[in-house]
Image (cartoon, rainbow, N blue to C red):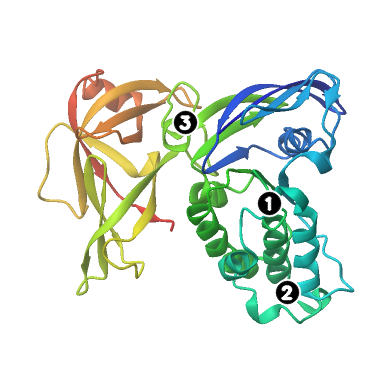
């Protein structure tokens, strides 16, 4: 399954101008600052916003071609808004039944019992929704969207209206459903932690345009156009827990090309996890050093050098081992000159901190 979208339309404050082919699996994050067009693009895909010069093809089915456009109710999609938009006078079960009826002839891609189990809402079925927490209501809204039989799930900042505690409550459920269901998700967010934990593919947007798009790890390791998830440039790597050091409360994470020690997050051996490494936490050396407090030192190859926001600084992309993984390192141009850094050069990456993000 693929999603081909092309929209060009003037909206108040910006012109939406995108031409993208998105994967038909996993989570694609539309990421960028407020007002850059993320939600507008999502609404165009859903048919909620008119884009006369657009084209939207989902798995070969034409949802829009120019002025010819399927109405939203005929597009096999589920839509989760910032606010849950539940029927407050109905029970949780009645809200879910509404979603199931809306599936109509499309049938159930996700069984009712499966949706209830995935979102952990079985104990809430007989309660009215107006007495539930924000996180509980959003879980019900997601389950209802799944029961409409969608081929595509659209989520517009589903955690934006939640406080930190409710976000932490909801995140594991989002991770689980994106791992266990074969339904592609387009997820709008300007929150770096959400993108780092959930996304497999990213579209970075600015002023109505997609400035970068591709697999998350690939886009985040670019030095020609650094994409910052929050305060700093850095990479996100998928790995597996291969060892736990009970004495020192550490875990060793294996990823394509190498291994790293991190603080033990309590995950069992064999668990898939994600780690994040910021460019500011990676230093370079021409040889390994034993006399250091740093636990992580990896042999790497300089892949590319790029500019940073200040002329004194540079970004260096590093290939790890023989795997497909990349790191970013920020260093001064003076240091890069002293090391005579060149593409293809073998060096050692010394990593000061690694964040386990789920």
Q: Position of residue 275 (x, y in %)?
A: 38, 51
Q: Is residue 118 visible?
A: yes
Q: In the displayed structure, would residue 129 be above or below residue 161?
A: below
Q: Position of residue 353 (x, y in %)?
A: 33, 52
Asked where in the image residue 207 lies, by quadrant, the reply is top right
Q: Residues within 10 Å of mark 1 (few under 14, many from 20)?
A: many
What residue did someone put label 1 on? 149
- Mark nearest the camera among 1 and 2 is 1
Q: Residues within 10 Å of mark 3 (few under 14, many from 20)?
A: some
Determine whether, in the image, residue 293 is placed left or right of residue 48: left
* SS for dot 2: loop
For image coordinates 63% across by 27% down, the residue present is 60
For image coordinates 21% across by 54% down, the residue present is 295
Asked where in the image residue 128 lies, by quadrant, the reply is bottom right
* SS for dot 3: helix
- Mark nearest the camera among 1 and 3 is 1
How far separated are the C-alphas under marks 1 and 2?
26 Å
Determine whether, in the image, residue 188 is placed left or right of residue 258: right
What residue did someone put label 2 on? 133
Earlier residue among tags 1 and 2: 2
Determine whether, in the image, residue 270 is placed left or right of residue 198: left
Q: In the displayed structure, would residue 115 be above or below residue 213?
A: below
Between 149 and 14, the one nearer to me in the picture: 149
Earlier residue among tags 2 and 3: 2
What residue did someone put label 3 on? 219
Q: Which image quarter holds the N terminus?
A: top right
Q: Position of residue 246 (x, y in %)?
A: 22, 74
Determine whether, in the image, residue 293 is placed left or right of residue 168: left
Earlier residue among tags 1 and 3: 1
């Amino acid at each position: 399954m693929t999603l081909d979208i092309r929209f060009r339309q003037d909206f108040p404050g910006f012109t939406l101008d995108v031409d993208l082919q998105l994967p038909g699996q996993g989570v694609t994050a539309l990421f960028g600052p407020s007002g850059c067009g993320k939600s507008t693009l999502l609404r165009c895909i859903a048919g909620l916003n008119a884009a006369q010069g657009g084209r939207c093809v989902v798995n070969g089915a034409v949802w829009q071609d120019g002025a010819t456009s399927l109405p939203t109710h005929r597009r096999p999609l589920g839509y989760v808004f910032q606010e849950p938009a539940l029927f407050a006078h109905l029970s949780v079960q009645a809200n879910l039944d509404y979603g199931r009826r809306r599936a109509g002839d499309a049938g159930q891609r996700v069984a009712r019992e499966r949706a209830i189990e995935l979102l952990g809402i079985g104990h809430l079925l007989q309660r009215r929704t107006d007495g539930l927490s924000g996180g509980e209501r959003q879980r019900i809204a997601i389950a209802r969207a799944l029961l409409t039989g969608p081929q595509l799930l659209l989520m517009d900042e589903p955690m934006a209206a939640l406080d930190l505690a409710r976000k932490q409550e909801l995140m594991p459920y989002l991770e689980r459903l994106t791992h266990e269901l074969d339904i592609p998700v387009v997820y709008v967010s300007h929150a770096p932690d959400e993108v780092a934990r959930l996304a497999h593919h990213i579209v970075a947007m600015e002023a109505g345009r997609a400035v970068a798009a591709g697999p998350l790890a690939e886009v985040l390791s670019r030095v020609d156009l650094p994409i910052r998830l929050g305060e700093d440039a850095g990479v996100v790597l998928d790995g597996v827990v291969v060892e736990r050091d009970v004495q020192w409360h550490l875990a060793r994470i294996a990823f394509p090309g190498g291994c790293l020690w991190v603080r033990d997050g309590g995950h069992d051996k064999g668990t898939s996890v994600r780690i994040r490494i910021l460019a500011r936490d990676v230093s370079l050396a021409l040889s390994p050093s034993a006399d250091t407090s740093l636990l992580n030192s990896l042999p790497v190859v300089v892949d590319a050098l790029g500019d940073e926001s200040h002329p004194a600084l540079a970004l260096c992309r590093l290939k790890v081992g023989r795997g497909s993984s990349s790191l970013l390192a920020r260093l001064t141009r003076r240091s890069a000159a002293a090391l005579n850094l060149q593409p293809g050069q073998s060096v050692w990456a010394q990593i000061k901190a690694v964040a386990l993000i789920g």
